[in-house]
Image: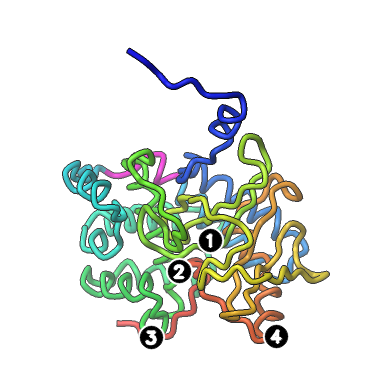
Amino acid sequence: MSSNILEPGQIEASAMTPPFVQLPPAALFRHRAERFTELAEGHAMGDYLLLMARVACAQQRVLEAPPELPVLSIEHLNAAYQHDMPPLAVDTLVQNGGWQTLLEAWLDAFTADVPALPDAVIQAANALREAGSETRKRWAIALLGGRFGDVPAAIAPFLGAALQLAWHYWLGQVDPQGIREREDQALCPCCGSLPVAGVIRHRRPIDGVRYLVCSLCAAEWHYVRLKCSHCLSTRELDYLHFEETPHGIKAEGCPECHTYLKQLYLEQTPEGEPLTADLASLDLDVRLDQQGYHRLAPNLLLAPGGGDEE
């Protein structure tokens, strides 16, 4: 039996090829809670960041001791791999009752914390708890579809947290090796959602490599640098950072489509985490909006709701 012998240069190139999909760590939510707590100190939005730390703590507790849920269909997952479809496609799994079971478990963990939550937060949690399953499903479809005005503003971040928990839980049943790389993959290959931000890795063998981070399931996928992840333009991009912006965060602005996506540089902030860094740098969003740039990346923990509660 013969085999191909790789030359030294080919070996190096093969070893340096970045994996297309990377799954988040098991302690993702714990890390987010720690980062929220650290970033809250002296921050203008400190109280909100501390509330989100509490949200993340509850997510982690449920993830470590989840309620009993049926496993996803192996046939469905394999069919998705075979046809290059997201195995955790939102339009399919939002119909699955599992996420509502996890939502209720998360609400129990979140409201059981001490000290007591503010009255407005308790009211929002109760509204989400008391809503019927069809109403919750309608809200979830709207939130994940970017129709934020169809979701009550008060419950949007808590619904978003429960959805993140569910998709992150399901992500543990996905085989990243089964997902084939596609060039210019602008949506999450695991669930089909938009990225919340990009992250520039800093450790070998993928130091300097850019990954996009899913706003829902937190999977990461490789996306080449110096290319707009929205319109795919390779025209010289603008990298914007202001004095008040937290260290290690820049916005990649596209002069063609006038959208932007934040990038977290781990070489500058090794302990950083994209979703928390995004919430701690909302001043950057304000400045970019004033300069005519538009944001497409959702952050489900600060989704602008607006509908009436039902």
Identify the residue at horizontal 69%, vertical 48% (top origin): 266
Q: Position of residue 133 (x, y in %)?
A: 22, 68
Separation of marks 1 and 2 at Cα, in angstroms: 9 Å
Q: Which amino acid, mark 2?
A: Ile
The residue segment tinted magenta is 61-67
**Which quadrant holds the C terminus?**
bottom left
Q: Nearer the viewer, mark 2 or mark 4?
A: 4
- Residue receiving disc 4: 291
In the rendered structure, which disc, 2 or 4, sits on the residue that comes first in sequence? 2
Mark with earlier residue (1, 4): 1
Does residue 178 appear to the left or right of 202 in the view shown? left
Of the numbered discs in the image, which one, if any, rests on residue 122? 2
Q: Are marks 1 and 4 in contact (CB under 8 Å)?
A: no
Q: Which residue is mark 3?
A: 307
Looking at the rendered image, the disc whose residue lies closer to the viewer, 2 or 3, is: 3
Sequence-first tag of 1 and 2: 1
- Answer left or right for 276 relative to 57: right
The reply to whether residue 124 is in sight is: yes
Say which amino acid is labelled 1.
Ala
